[in-house]
């Protein structure tokens, strides 16, 4: 597995046209579309869109006859299947990167295979298929190593509560690969902690808050609340404030949604493990163009163990390109220290992370 630990500072450029608009549909200019299909609708994807736009400008997709689009799914496996089937019936689709809603969903995997059979390049980004069953449905995966991400979140909880605690996890779709892997990784690293519950909300924001209430009603000893997807942070903070339990509760979350950033600024989140969706969007667009153009040198640069032929890789996990992780804490008073985490995980105090976002004109990550 290759880990990318650095990414150049890329100022966001405005890319005029369909590259900045989800679901523009076919145009009459003969251009081919490069699509990133999300699992749902969340501000997390806005940073990925900006990465796509920057790559589109840097690679001059327009002159090459391509345009990049981010297409948002409706949160359901069926929605993804329907969109993939729609792409298969359109002649202007050149490549698709998909954040898979349900890793074990046979229909999604088959729709991906059908796209590939038509000559469309297919990869996964952010959340993969079940690799033991459906690896052949895509060329490669690009995104966070979600097991490691979960482990880093577990280390944060352990560092904040050295004697252990009792926790619950909250996520949108429990069947998504990134959800399964993060929850498993958290359990591996949170030594001395006991899991009380794990609830999914089907990406329903009102249900996300209700799930937190359910846990606090059923488990009065719950002292660590774990947000697995970006918007879960806001749901957790709102209910903890509603119950006036902040002093008793450790809150650790994945991602830095705009609302979560405000919550950390206000002292309501103890640690965030932050992905780099901007980098995923940039590299995903770069990879899709390279695949379309049969640019073996670029593909080999990104996946060094690729054999140069088909889906063959010289290493078992050579088809995985891992993007950056950051741990963000409120300030220097935090109990958490850089030495508690992997060398490849970047450690930020909130003020420095905010400056990193501002430099890239990002509202979240």
Image: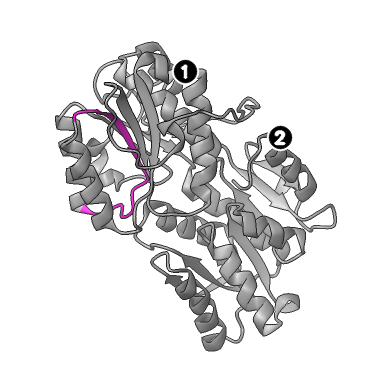
Work out whether residue 132 or residue 125 is closer to the camera in this orientation and state it: 125
Q: Earlier in the sequence, mark 1 or mark 2?
A: 1
Looking at the image, which residue sits at the far right? 333
Q: Position of residue 124 (x, y in %)?
A: 35, 39
Q: How far separated are the C-alphas under marks 1 and 2?
A: 21 Å
Helix, strand or loop under label 1: loop
Q: Can you name the residue that lies furthest to the front here? A: 28
Q: Specify how the rendered protein is coloured.
A: one colour
Q: What residue is at 27 percent from the left and 35 percent from the top?
A: 138
Q: Residue at left 23%, top 43%?
A: 84
Query: Which residue is disc 1 drawn over?
Result: 59
Write the residue at 54% across / 77% down: 212
In this rendering, the answer to whether 168 lies above or below 47 is below
Q: Do labels 1 and 2 touch, CB within 8 Å?
A: no
Quarter residue 289 falls in: top left
Image point 29% across, 22% down: which residue?
29
**Secondary element type, mark 2:** helix
Classified by dominant secondary structure, the portion drawn in magenta counts as loop
Residue 309: x percent and y percent? 25, 17
Residue 209, horizontal then vertical, whole percent: 52, 75
Q: Is residue 272 left or right of residue 197?
A: right
Give how far across and how far down residue 223 sits, in percent: 64, 76
Task: In the rendered view, tell whether residue 68 sits above or below residue 265.
Answer: above
What residue sits right under mark 2 in the picture? Answer: 359
Query: Magenta stretch: residue 104 in it?
Result: yes
Q: Which residues are magenta?
A: 91-105
In the depicted view, which residue is nearer to us: 268 or 181? 268
* Crowdedness near tag 1: few (<14), some (14–19) or many (≥20) residues, C-alpha within 10 Å: some
Left or right of 105 on screen, residue 342: right
Q: How many marks?
A: 2
The N terminus sits in image quarter: top left
């Amino acid at each position: 597995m290759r880990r990318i630990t650095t990414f150049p500072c890329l100022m966001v450029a405005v890319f005029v046209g369909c590259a900045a608009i989800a679901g523009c549909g076919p145009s009459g200019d003969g251009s081919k579309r490069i699509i990133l299909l999300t699992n749902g609708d969340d501000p997390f994807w806005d940073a990925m869109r900006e990465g796509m736009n920057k790559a589109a400008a840097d690679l001059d997709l327009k002159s090459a006859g391509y345009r990049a689009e981010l297409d948002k799914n409706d949160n359901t496996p069926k929605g993804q299947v329907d969109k993939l089937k729609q792409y298969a019936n359109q002649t202007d689709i050149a490549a698709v990167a998909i954040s898979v809603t349900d890793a074990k969903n046979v229909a999604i995997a088959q729709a991906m295979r059908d796209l590939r059979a038509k000559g469309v390049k297919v990869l996964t980004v952010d959340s993969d298929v079940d690799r033991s069953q459906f690896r052949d449905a895509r060329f490669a995966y690009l995104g966070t190593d979600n097991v490691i991400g979960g482990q880093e979140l577990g280390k944060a909880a352990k560092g904040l509560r050295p004697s252990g605690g009792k926790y619950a996890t909250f996520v949108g779709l429990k069947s998504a690969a990134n959800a399964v892997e993060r929850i498993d990784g958290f359990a591996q690293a949170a030594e001395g902690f006991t899991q009380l519950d794990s609830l999914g909300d089907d990406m329903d924001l009102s249900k996300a808050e209700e799930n937190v209430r359910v846990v606090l009603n059923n488990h009065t000893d719950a002292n660590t609340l774990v947000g697995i997807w970006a918007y879960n942070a806001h749901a957790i903070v709102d209910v903890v404030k509603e119950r006036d339990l902040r002093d008793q509760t450790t809150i650790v979350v994945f991602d830095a949604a705009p609302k979560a950033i405000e919550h950390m600024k206000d002292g309501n989140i103890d640690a965030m493990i932050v992905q780099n969706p901007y980098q995923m969007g940039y590299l995903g667009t770069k990879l899709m163009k390279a695949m379309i153009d049969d640019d073996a040198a670029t593909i080999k640069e990104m996946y060094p163990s690729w054999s140069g032929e088909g889906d063959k890789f010289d290493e078992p996990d050579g088809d995985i390109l891992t993007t950056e992780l950051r741990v963000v804490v409120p300030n220097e008073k935090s109990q958490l220290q850089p030495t508690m985490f992997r060398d490849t995980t970047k450690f930020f105090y909130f003020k420095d992370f905010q400056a990193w976002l501002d430099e890239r004109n990002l509202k979240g990550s």
